[in-house]
Image (cartoon, helix red, strand yellow):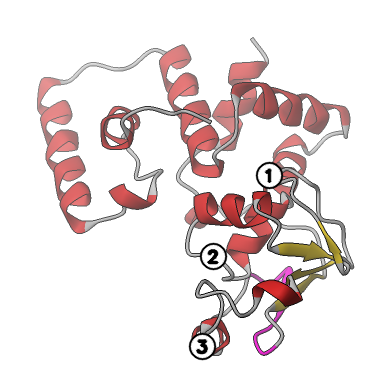
Amino acid sequence: MIIGPKYKIAKRLGAAVFEKTQTQKFALSEARTARNKTRRGGMASDYKKQLIEKQKMRFSYGISEKQLSRYVKESFEKGHQPIAALIARLESRLDNVVYRLGLAKSRRLARQLVSHGHICVNGRRLNIPSHKVAIGDVVSVREQSKQSPLFVTLDETLASYTAPHWLSLTAKSLSGTKGAEPTYEPSETLFDPQQVLEYYSR
């Protein structure tokens, strides 16, 4: 997915949605921008706020507009808790699970690992980053890939890594199991999913 100049996009959205913008320099720049906006006053329209939150979600997970639109539609169809359903679907993407297990330092790298065939689900190699990982599925690094420089010392790094509560990690075997559905934690996200749902409800 082509997304353009990342620093410029992150500045426009006011959030460090890309790995290269997750720095102290960017945080200080955003703090100055926020102060200047406060001094100038003025409020963004509801539509603009919703659009910004939608873009934050898209770029955080590295997905296309079409994919996000489909996930939102599915979440509304699942019942009275669309936010929980949407977050669960996004977090259950194979590339995100690889990232959350600590097998990749970013979602972008995780997506590349999956696309290049380094990842298996229940022992079967998959190269579809959007694949939905189900409860009980085991996600692991392909045996033939473990000697790659990408993974050769990863087990040592993972020894001190703590995966989210819905995943269980086995550092030695470079694998993990999805034990439950992901839950929405506001403190862990850069976007407001309620605003995203409102954007698509117009």
- Left or right of residue 88, residue 26 in this image: left
- Residue 64: x and y, percent? 60, 28
Q: Could you tell me which secondary element the residue under label 2 belongs to?
A: loop
* Mark 3–mark 1 distance (CA, rounded to whole Å): 26 Å
Residue under label 1, please give it: 90
Labels 2, 1: front one: 2
Q: Earlier in the sequence, mark 3 or mark 2?
A: 2
Q: Is residue 90 left or right of residue 7?
A: right
Residue at 33% in and 36% down: 6
State the residue position of label 2.
104
Q: Mark 2 and 1 residues: CB-CB less than 8 Å, in contact?
A: no
Which residue type does callout 1 highlight?
Leu
**Within the magenta stretch, is there residue 127?**
no
Instruction: Name the residue: 53% across, 36% down.
Output: 57
User: Magenta part of the protein: which range?
Assistant: 164-172
Separation of marks 3 and 2 at Cα, in angstroms: 15 Å
- Place of residue 149 in the rendered image (x, y in percent of width and height, measured from the top left): 50, 75
- The residue that mark 3 highlights is 160
